[in-house]
Each structure stands twice: as structure tokens, then as C-alpha cells.
Image (spheres, rainbow, N blue to C red):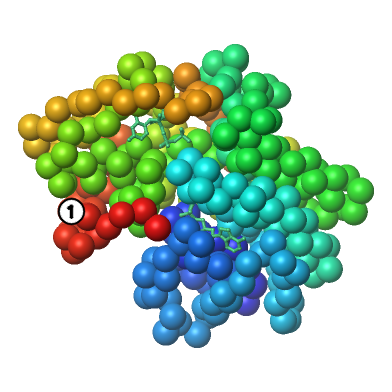
Amino acid sequence: MKRVLITGAAGFLGSHLCDRFIKDGFEVLGMDNLITGNLSNIEHLFGNKHFTFYNHDVSNFVHVPGELHYILHFASPASPIDYLKIPIQTLKVGSLGTHNLLGLAKAKNARILVASTSEVYGDPLVHPQTEDYWGNVNPIGPRGVYDEAKRFQEAITMAYNRFHGVETRIVRIFNTYGPRMRLNDGRVLPAFIGQALRGEDLTVFGDGSQTRSFCYVDDLVEGIYRLLFSDYDLPVNVGNPDEITIKEFADEIIKLTGTNQKVVYKELPKDDPTQRQPNINVAKEKLDWSPKVSRAEGLKITYDYFKQLPKTEWYKKEH
Ligand code: NAD
Ligand code: UDP
């Protein structure tokens, strides 16, 4: 049985990855320090003899017993309000954490895939973003703690690949959504759905003309899975190119939830990217991957998930 270590296992993406690898017959070691994650995302795996959970901060030395074939490094705050609240931990997990996991991969002769992000492109001057674009990032702005940690992560990953011969994979993830996001994590989709459920107005930042391209979590997991088992070691964009303005997105959520909420406009956060859309030609060519779930389908599943949560979850403040 092949053994895979998944960091960030109690988070949104990590927990879906744990499910996928368990389903496909792997032994899964999940690791998380629960700083933004929640054990409820993986509690259904606790009785499974092929799943082990380690409560550990990967910015400190990482040890796991026995052999290891694969590592998926997904530990990191991902929502702007999270990484603005814990900027040093964010920098540490992207740099020291990645260094520890690359060291573990080298020691165990394991293949490692790291979770990078469309944020490495910053506020992009090339549109749609292709992997050969170097980006437009403000290193000292508030978002720099995340963007630069991820850029360092990519650099050290390629260095381990070239200098130590470690088998590495880099996925650049574009905005992804689905069940198990935290309703209060501040990202736009849970923010809007939470507001609709509570009967509050939807808060659009700026004039709402900035764009994003939203990918449903199952599509993303499939792309990551294919990348891990491919022989391609340069960064690959995985996301859904279906681009929409944030104002249109708010209107879609109002329509979906059948509420009569209004849109209210708030100040645009500093360095908020004005447009974002992945060019996925590399994923198509190298992984034979493209997204299958439309926004209408994905939003419906996600809304139904949030709706059935206990009302106490709807009203929970950020932690
Ligand atoms: P999340 O906050 O739901 O999950 C992150 C998990 O990592 C949490 O469970 C958290 O407790 C854990 N964690 C954070 N620091 C840790 C540390 N030092 N040691 C151990 N565990 C730690 O976020 P997510 O959306 O699931 O994102 C997962 C990964 O994917 C992140 O690396 C993020 O940068 C990347 N990513 C996500 C998106 C997206 O749209 N969801 C987009 C781009 C990149
Ligand atoms: N946004 C918004 N209202 C909210 C939360 C976010 O208008 O309540 C905007 C935010 O300014 C950004 C977009 O939605 O332009 C996506 O924000 P998110 O935090 O989800 O992700 P990111 O900016 O990292 O893509």
C-alpha cells in the first residue's frame, strides 16, 4: 500500500484530498496544526485504519515513521483575512514548512507536490495568466506575506528538484470553492452565501468590476491527482477559466439563494487583484485535464451544504 502525507489535512482542500487518496487505496497520513482548519472536516476518517492524524505545526521539524511515497504540502492559511491576521505564521509555513517537507521528501525518497497559487501572479499585467508570466507582486504590501511565501516556496522546490534531484510538482491553484469552506473565512463565496443565509446585504468590495474565475473543488482535486502522477515538474495552473466580475457573482448568489438581499459597496482592500483568469493549456496538454463542473452546478451543491449546517455555524464569528 502506498503511503501519502497530506499537510493541511483538516482544511478545505486538504480534507478533500484525504478523501480522494483513501478512496483510491492509499494509506493517508494527515497533518495539521488546526490554525485555520477544523477536525470536523476529517472526523469521518478517524475510524479508518488507513488514516492517521498528526497534530503538528509543519514549520517545525517534521518526522513521520516508516516509508513514505508521496507528500502533498497544503498547509498554509489561504484566505486573505486569515493570512492578514497571522502574517508571520503564513511566511513561516510557506518557507520553513516547505523546507522541512522537501527535506522529508529527500530523506524518504518521496515525490512531493506543493500547493502554490494564482497569487504568485499578483495583480497580473498579462491576461489570462500563463505559467511563463513572472507576475506583478508588491512584496511589502499586506498580501505580500502570502504571495512572497508562495513564490519562495516555488523557488526552493525547484532548487531541491535541480540540486538534490527530488521529484517535485507545483500546482498553481486559482480560486476554488465547495463544501467544507469556513462560512466565516472571509473569502468571497462563503461571505456572500453567509450573508444571504443570515438575511444581510452582500458586501461587494470596490465597485465590483474586479474579476475572478471560480473552480469547483472536485475538478481541482482531479487536476492535482493527475499532476502528482504525471512526469511534468514545472508549475501548472489548475483552475476554471470561466471568469466573472464580483458584482455579477453577487447577483448570481442572490438569485441562487432566492433572497431579496441588496448589494452594498465597501472599500477595496489594498492590492486586491483587478483581474484573474487561468490559461489552462498546459494542464490540458500535459494532464489531459479541464474542469467539468459548471459554476451553476457547483454553487448549488455548495449552497445546499452551507444551508444544512446548524444555524450556530451561520452566525459564528471569525476565529
Ligand atoms: P484552509 O485554511 O482551509 O486549509 C489550510 C490548512 O492548513 C488548515 O487546516 C490549517 O490549520 C493548516 N495549517 C496552516 N498552517 C499550518 C502549519 N504551520 N502546520 C500545519 N498545518 C497548518 O485553506 P485551503 O483553501 O484548504 O488551502 C489549502 C492550500 O491550498 C494552501 O496552501 C493554499 O495556499 C492553497 N490554495 C488554495 C486556494 C483556494 O482557492 N482554496 C487557492 C490557491 C492556493
Ligand atoms: N470580496 C468582496 N466581498 C467580500 C469578500 C471578498 O467583494 O465580502 C472580493 C475581494 O475584494 C476580491 C474577490 O472578492 O476582489 C475575491 O476575494 P477572495 O478573498 O475570495 O479571494 P482573492 O482576493 O484571494 O482572490
Q: How far across and down, in percent of the image, does residue 16 sit?
A: 44, 59
Task: Please give the name of the residue rendered at 60% of the width and 14% of the height, measured from the top-left corner.
Answer: 125
Q: Please determine whether, in this image, residue 130 is positioned above or below residue 233.
A: above
Depth check, front residue: 137 or 161: 137
Residue position for label 1 = 307
Q: Which quarter holds ligand 2?
A: top left
Q: Is residue 163 left or right of residue 256?
A: right
Amino acid type at circle 1 is Lys
Q: How far across and down, in percent of the image, does residue 171 sit?
A: 62, 43
Q: Please determine whether, in this image, residue 228 is positioned above or below residue 256.
A: below
Q: How far across and down, in percent of the image, does residue 275 sit?
A: 47, 20
Question: Which quarter of the rendered picture does the C terminus lie within?
Answer: bottom left
Observer able to see residue 289: no
Observer able to see residue 209: yes
Q: Is residue 241 left or right of residue 195?
A: right
Task: Please give the name of the residue rendered at 14% of the width and 28% of the height, measured from the top-left corner.
Answer: 262
Task: Please give the name of the residue rendered at 51% of the width and 62% of the height, measured from the top-left corner.
Answer: 35
Q: Residues within 10 Å of mark 1 (few under 14, many from 20)?
A: some
Depth check, front residue: 230 or 39: 39
Q: Please determine whether, in this image, residue 17 is positioned above or below residue 173.
A: below
